[in-house]
Amino acid sequence: MITGTPKPIEEILEMLEPYDDIILAGCFGCVTVCRVGGDKEVQVLASTIRLAREAAGRKIEIKEVCLERQCDPEYLEPMRPYVEDHQAVLSIACGAGIQFMAEKFTRTPLLPGINTGFLGVTERQGEWTERCQGCGDCVLHLTGGICPVTRCAKSIFHGPCGGSVNGTCEVDKNVKCGWQLIIDRLVALDQMDNYTKLKPYKGWDSSRDGGPRRILREDMV
Amino acid sequence: MVIGCLEGDCHYVNGNIRARARVKRVYQILDQIDIGPERVRMYNLSAGEGAKFAAFTSEFVAQVEELGPSKINLARKGAGNATEQEVDAT
């Protein structure tokens, strides 16, 4: 899922300074699962903003909504009849959802209520860790299901660097060395021959180096 | 006031521990918006500790009275449009 963290309330209040009537929009997608932008978070944040503004002597009207997904046009359209009745939209969806809403409702300012994080997994309730950087050229079949692009701090491709010490990464002693994990897994799977295969240079044009990406499925359009 | 079961004695195993973490978050939110975290408090009690419950309640009420009206309470009174219920609730 796409993860995120709430923006500090001080930052949100500063963004809202020019406005007295806003929509606070959550999303039932990824941000609901990682507890940062769902229906419940809409309610908590709306209450927080109302309390802060009332304590400051300047009330604010907040219409609370939570869309099925902010990254799909059909779920944004129901907002169209009323979005311009408000001065701004504060969205606590991921950056993709916020931008898509901004593209659809061009005359209403869109404000981000969260900092979007990474593509990750739930380790346990309240803890999420990164697994994928969306490089567009998956090699997990060769690396025991562990991604060298994401799990190695340097995204290197042919084994651990000199900063790998006792299975931990030099960038942080709490971070496991991605390549140590890969080798341990390959040994367990009896697939160490994958490690000895010299992989050609990875083409990064399918990753961010190629600019904003696009997927076009001819069978679906 | 938030009352949870005694630690280690929750029907929901660690529900009261999670509740304490949630209440801590409420402290942070109230602190960040300058209302102050002292207006919320969590206690752990068993169902049989009526006298302790009464004592904690008195203690918390005294604490809130000492704090005086919250900023919101004052803003509502200043605006002159608060109902008695709204003022009492803050």
Image: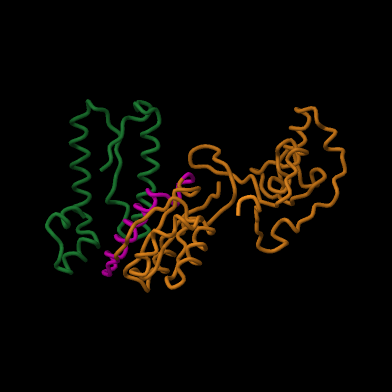
Chain colours: A orange, B green
Q: Position of residue A24 (x, y in %)?
A: 38, 60
- Relative depth, front residue between B73 and A107: A107
The image quadrant that residue B16 belongs to is top left
- Relative depth, front residue between A54 and B68: A54
Q: Position of residue B54 (x, y in %)?
A: 18, 36
Residue A28, placed above or below residue B49? below
Q: Is residue A202 left or right of residue B21?
A: right
Q: Position of residue A136 (x, y in %)?
A: 70, 51
Extreme residue toward the left, this view = B84
Q: Is residue A190 left or right of residue B35?
A: right
Picture residue at 30% right of the left edge, 61% below the top: A50
Helix, strand or loop for the magenta stretch, by majority:
helix
- Relative depth, front residue between B31 and A32: A32
- How many marks overall? 0
- Relative depth, front residue between A187 and B1: A187
Q: Position of residue A137 (x, y in %)?
A: 73, 49
| The stretch drawn in magenta includes residue A48 | yes
Q: Is residue B23 left or right of residue A221?
A: left
Q: Is residue A213 left or right of residue A158?
A: left
Which contiguous range is marked in magenta?
Answer: A33-60
Quadrant into which the C terminus of chain A falls: bottom right
Residue A143, placed above or below residue A63? above
Picture residue at 78% right of the left edge, 29% below the top: A187
| The stretch drawn in magenta includes residue A93 | no
